[in-house]
Image (tube, grey):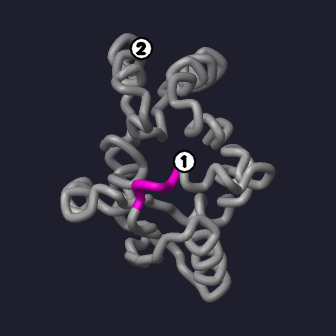
Amino acid sequence: MVPLPPLLHNHPERIADAVEQAVDRLEPDYGRVAVGYADCGSYGALDDLCARRGLARLPGLHCYDVYGGADRLAAMFEDDPGTYVLTDFLVRSFDRTVVTELGLDRHPELRDDYFRHYTRMVWLAQQPDDELHRVADRAAHRIGLPLTVVETGTHRLERALEALL
């Protein structure tokens, strides 16, 4: 497994290029390369790359589909389009990937510009524990949203990886 920088998700237009560079590095040494990304906001660019290079990728529009199930996520957004979703990774890295990257640490007044239309935060908890619950609560409080915890486990990800490989 070769991880790519997680902050690519803040710039999804760069994901396909970064994946292709990784594939170029890996293909000479491996008989088969698979892509551990859903579309992740690339708006089809990752699918185009996968089709062109004969690669398989994780299913779904985003990792939330992989963890929570596409139907469940669609229903969640249908029920409340103002849903801001976190995974365990995003809970752990919230200060860096959201607060710092959006400049909220330096300009807290931007909070309303970014989050005005959100009505709740949903944490798709893969491996929740007491500390992660505290961190998730702190993240929700930081941007002024109520927190809903949906325990998903990792079984959907495990099945998707098995199918991918």
Specify the amino acid type for callout 1.
Asp
What numbered label is drawn on residue 73? Answer: none
Query: Can residue 27 be seen by looking at this rendering?
Result: no
Q: Which residues are magenta?
A: 114-118
Q: Where residue 18 sits in the image (x, y, percent)?
A: 60, 23
**Label 1: few (<14), some (14–19) or many (≥20) C-alpha neighbours in 10 Å:** few
Query: Does the magenta stretch mainly form a helix, a strand or a loop?
Result: loop
Q: Is residue 139 left or right of residue 121?
A: right
**Label 2: few (<14), some (14–19) or many (≥20) C-alpha neighbours in 10 Å:** few
User: For the residues marked 1 and 2, what is the alpha-carbon distance in whole angstroms?
Assistant: 40 Å
Residue placed at 46% from the left, 76% from the top?
146
Q: Is residue 95 left or right of residue 118?
A: right
Is residue 23 or residue 31 the one in the foreground? 23
Q: What residue is pinned by disc 2?
A: 53
Q: Secondary structure at mark 1?
A: helix
Is residue 107 or residue 6 the one in the foreground? 107
Q: Secondary structure at mark 2?
A: helix
Is residue 129 or residue 51 the one in the foreground? 129
Residue placed at 48% from the left, 27% from the top?
32
Instruction: Quarter of the image for the C terminus: give it.
Output: top left
Which residue of the protein is positioned furthest toward the bottom in this rendering? 130
Specify the amino acid type for callout 2.
Arg
What numbered label is drawn on residue 113? Answer: 1
